[in-house]
Image: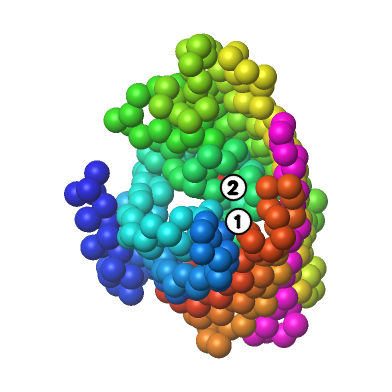
């Protein structure tokens, strides 16, 4: 794996290289997104109050190889310093991590307004709509909605080994995905407690700029080293997780809206089942071609707690491939007293031929 990451990283640094013409049968490109960031919060305060500003960076490389008129290979390699993602701000530990988010081969065909794509390898989850926008150049705000993250979230943005089929017929799109583990607890191929999970989704474009969709996943999710696998618990294979949700995207003129509503159930035998209902809605208003205002309201109702997140940001494009975002997030709930967990953050994003992150 380390060798594969090194090769992918080295290839991705050639982000401006294109080996063949755009319409050639074979070619290579490596779009790149680089983000420099800083966040100020009190989340890591334990004994000494005062808060701290945390500088961090994230680079995502998308090496893409076209292998003919139908075949292709795609990857997503992430290099980041801890403290970049809001979920890491409660720890003062600082290190650089390299992650292989996606790496798959695919076959695609398009004919008479219909398309079919088959992918196999390490894939992002087909559940929901936000995994398509994890790139900083596409996320209007700075943090992620409350149901998404890297560890101990209902839907991880880490990749899962598996296979997927996507289809588009006119205004209708559908996808089905089979993976080695749950979107809530991705397992590597060399780890124990791997159990088949399936994910499906579909959508309908009512008119240009207005789409509604649904998605669902189900399968065993626990592993024996999991922090919530308690003594006396049943074998993980008999404890499924179920998630289902709806999503909507709408855009017209200066306005763009995204929203999702999701419900998750995680089965246990040694304790009551765990439930989580998550919703969010976000909006972006383009003040002018260079400047926009954005906001997101998220709600999370869990078996033992509930909280809400309010995030606002202003974005400015000093150049065609650059984006500066400044935002503030406030958390409300019993587990978030006062303003301790609120975050003020800025990002400077540089995009070099950013990829089209779509299901197809």
Residue 44 lies left or right of residue 99; in this view the side is: right
Residue named by callout 2:
148
| Nearer to the camera, 92 or 249 | 92
- The residue drawn where x is 49% and y is 23% is 229
Asked which secondary structure carries label 2, the reply is strand
Q: Is residue 47 above or below residue 294?
A: above
Q: Position of residue 190 (x, y in %)?
A: 29, 30
Quarter of the image with the N terminus is top left
Residue 260 percent location from the top left of the image: 73, 47
- Residue 234 vs 27, above or below: the answer is above
Residue 224 found in image quarter: top left
Q: Nearer the viewer, residue 276 or 175?
A: 276
- Residue sticking out furthest to the bottom: 318
The span shown in magenta is 286-310
Q: Residue at x 67, y 83 (%)?
A: 291
Q: Are marks 2 and 1 in contact (CB under 8 Å)?
A: yes
Query: Which residue is disc 1 drawn over?
Result: 144
Residue reaching furthest to the left: 3
* Crowd class of label 1 (few under 14; some 14 to 19; many from 20; radius 10 Å): many
């Amino acid at each position: 794996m380390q060798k594969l990451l090194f090769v992918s990283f080295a290839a991705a640094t050639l982000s401006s290289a294109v080996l063949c013409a755009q319409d050639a049968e074979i070619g290579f490109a490596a779009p790149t997104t680089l983000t420099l960031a800083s966040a100020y919060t009190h989340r890591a305060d334990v004994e000494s109050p005062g808060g701290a500003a945390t500088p961090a960076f994230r680079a995502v490389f998308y090496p893409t190889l076209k292998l003919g008129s139908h075949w292709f290979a795609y990857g997503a390699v992430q290099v980041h310093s801890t403290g970049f993602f809001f979920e890491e701000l409660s720890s003062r530990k600082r290190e650089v991590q390299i992650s292989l988010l996606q790496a798959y081969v695919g076959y695609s065909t398009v004919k008479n307004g219909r398309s079919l794509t088959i992918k196999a390898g390490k894939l992002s989850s087909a559940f929901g709509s936000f995994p398509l926008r994890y790139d900083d150049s596409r996320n209007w705000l700075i943090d992620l909605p409350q149901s998404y993250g890297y560890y101990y979230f209902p839907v991880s943005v880490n990749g899962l080994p598996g296979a997927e089929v996507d289809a588009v017929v006119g205004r209708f799109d559908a996808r089905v995905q089979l993976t080695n583990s749950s979107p809530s607890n991705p397992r590597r191929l060399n780890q124990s407690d791997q159990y088949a999970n399936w994910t499906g989704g579909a959508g309908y474009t009512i008119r240009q700029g207005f789409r509604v969709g649904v998605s669902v996943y189900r399968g065993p999710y626990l592993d024996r080293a999991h922090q919530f696998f308690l003594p006396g618990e049943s074998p993980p294979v008999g404890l499924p997780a179920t998630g289902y949700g709806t999503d909507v995207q709408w855009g017209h003129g200066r306005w763009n809206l995204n929203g999702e509503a999701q419900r998750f159930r995680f089965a246990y035998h040694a304790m009551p089942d765990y439930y989580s209902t998550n919703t969010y809605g976000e909006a972006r208003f383009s003040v002018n071609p260079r400047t926009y205002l954005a906001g997101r309201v998220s709600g999370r109702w869990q078996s033992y707690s509930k909280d809400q997140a309010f995030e606002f940001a202003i974005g400015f494009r000093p150049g065609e491939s650059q984006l500066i975002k400044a935002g503030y997030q406030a958390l409300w709930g019993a587990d978030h007293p006062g303003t301790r967990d609120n975050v003020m953050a800025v990002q400077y994003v540089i995009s070099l031929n950013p990829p089209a992150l779509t299901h197809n």
